[in-house]
Amino acid sequence: MNPDEALKQAGQHFRSARFGDAMRSAHAVLARQPGSSHALRLLAAAAENQGDLAEADRALAALARIEPTAADCFDSLIRISHRRGDLHRLAEGLLGRVRLDPGRWELWNDLGAALERIGQAHGAYAAYRRAASVSPSEDRALLNLAALAFRQNGWTLAYRLAKRAEAITSPSADALLVAAHAAQALGRTQLARIGYRRFLTLAPANADGWQGISSISEPAVPPEQQLLPRIRAWRLAPAEPIAMVGMADGARIAGDPGTACSWARKAISLLPSLAASHNALFNAYTDLTLDLDALRCAHRAVHLAPARGELHVNLGIALKELGRLKEAEQAIRAGLARRPDDPAAHMSLATTLLIGGRLREGLEEYEWRNVGTGSYYDTLSIPIWDGRPIPSGRLLIWGEQGVGDQILFSQFIRRALERAPNILVECDGRLVSILRRTYPNIEVIERNRHKPDLPPGSVAAQLAICSLPRVLGLDMESFQSKGAYLVPDRERSAPNAARLRLLGDGLKVGIAWRSLKDSPYARRHHTRLTEWGGILRTPNIRFVNLQYGDRRDEIAEVSARFGVDIAQFDDIDMFNDLDGLLALSSQLDLVLATATTAYVLAGAAGTEILHLMARTNYTLFGAGREPLSPRSRAFVREPGETWDPAIEALARALGQRVQHR
């Protein structure tokens, strides 16, 4: 059969859907006429319909060499490469097609997607840009460009491009989602929250949107309500690892790090390359104080996503908890290089520096604690005090953080008076009477949760109380307390002295061992009273409870176990009546405590303190005692240790103290 007849027969077989016969006839033609473009087209089409995609690809490759400008050849190659999942050949086909027809934006857009999937980000970026320039009114190319910029950590560019796409087709759900993701990555949480909510009004069944909004922390929202969007995301996509990460984070917020571990491990088992899963497990391990495990997860997360600044910061946190301060600082600074305006990262650096005793540098970084938090700095139209004298105007010093911090830093009010004699202090209501007594020439009012009631123009400058050492320019020597700095109520001190004498001979020693909540901080910085056996067995001591909360069961247990009586003065509310607690503490010979308000008040009264502290408690400032308490000695739990060595050392010191009284 001559080639023309064979070609005609091949066409008949193809039209009759006898694709195998069509392929054999086409091969017969090509055996005699290898350059027959008609035979190659028939062979490619028949092979594609027969399901022999590799043979179709070979025929199209041969055809492209003969007719390099044949559009139908590239169209067939694109279609077959899609079916085969051969992204490299797909990119080749699309590249050939756009050369023939460069005015079709969708071809450039598809080329960008193919190049991106084979890891050629620069080529993909150029293709998406060409698509957007060819058809400026088409939002899809802009959105793909924005998504690529986001994946390459170009968050600012991603946000701008997504907003441009949104303006073209409004409202655009995809544009809202990309813009929200980018805003969150930039730390603009309010913008991200608004974006996610707008997106979910258009796509309420989209798990990605629910996952996004659930990942934005809202401290004012109860934990059980913060769980709801995470549960919604997981129910919409129960097999998606990122939804499991959301459940892990939700379990942590609800105070269940064990369940958080389970969710994070499940996500890792399904997709080991997802950095967010390892980061979620890091967070859970950190809450459980499993620091070596947390460090391993932090390293893995950084390895998988080295461009994400927050992962470097978390690595620094893990290193800090293990006492590896130099490495911790390096990791946190690496995170800040990627997220220079992240307040949480700056605060991690601040505590790392302060733990290492680098006071000046640490206090500078510590100023980030009020950035973007809605503090008075944000709500009052009053200049922030820079430490220069205010001879006639009034200075507002406002209390912040916990009551213990307000007590510790209140000692610097005396130094501030040298530069600003007219001071108004706004503090925790439990401290008002104490500070009024201590500083009779200044005005002290209770802290308003929202905004102080100040007449317009009545205050010349404002300052957060914990900023006083930095503004006053104190170094470590001048930073240290030189003596008692709060004045107890004499009318309450005398009766306390009398009833302490009624306890009998021996040192009168106050004790406080834990906080009210079982939190990650408490697990690191507080103890259980049952661990104090060596301390409580010390002879010739009369122990007095300074611990707030109902601890009768704990006290009864240790009394029975160690044969010790612990006096309890129920007329003093150790949590709310800080004036009464100060009066009692001032009459004790000694106070033993962890990092609680009780030890801070005792130190302020000038009482001798032996305290149990974790090395990572930054108020040690790298010293062997807390500089802010005048008569203190620290017994430190080193990273990786239990409390046992520190408790044993304190018990020995207590025994020596009894002998030399």
Image (cartoon, grey):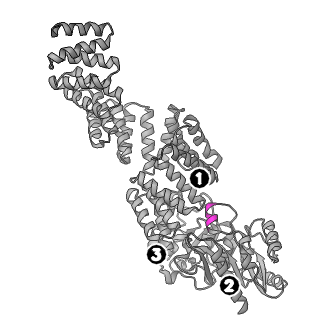
Judged by its main secondary structure, the magenta piece is helix
Q: Label 1 belongs to which residue? A: 219
Sequence-earlier tag: 1 or 2? 1
Residue 561 belongs to magenta span: no
Tell me the distance, in whole angstroms, between the alpha carbons under discs 1 and 3.
31 Å
Q: Are marks 1 and 2 in contact (CB under 8 Å)?
A: no
Please indicate, yes or no, whether residue 450 appears anywhere in the rendered image: yes
Tell me the distance, in whole angstroms, between the alpha carbons under discs 1 and 2.
43 Å
Residue 523 belongs to magenta span: yes
For numbered disc 2, what is the local secondary structure?
Answer: helix
For numbered disc 1, what is the local secondary structure?
Answer: loop
Three-letter amino acid code of the residue under disc 3: Arg
Tell me the distance, in whole angstroms, between the alpha carbons under discs 3 and 2.
31 Å
Sequence-earlier tag: 3 or 2? 3
Q: Residue extending furthest front?
A: 1
At x 57%, y 55%, the residue is 284
Q: Label 2 belongs to which residue? A: 652
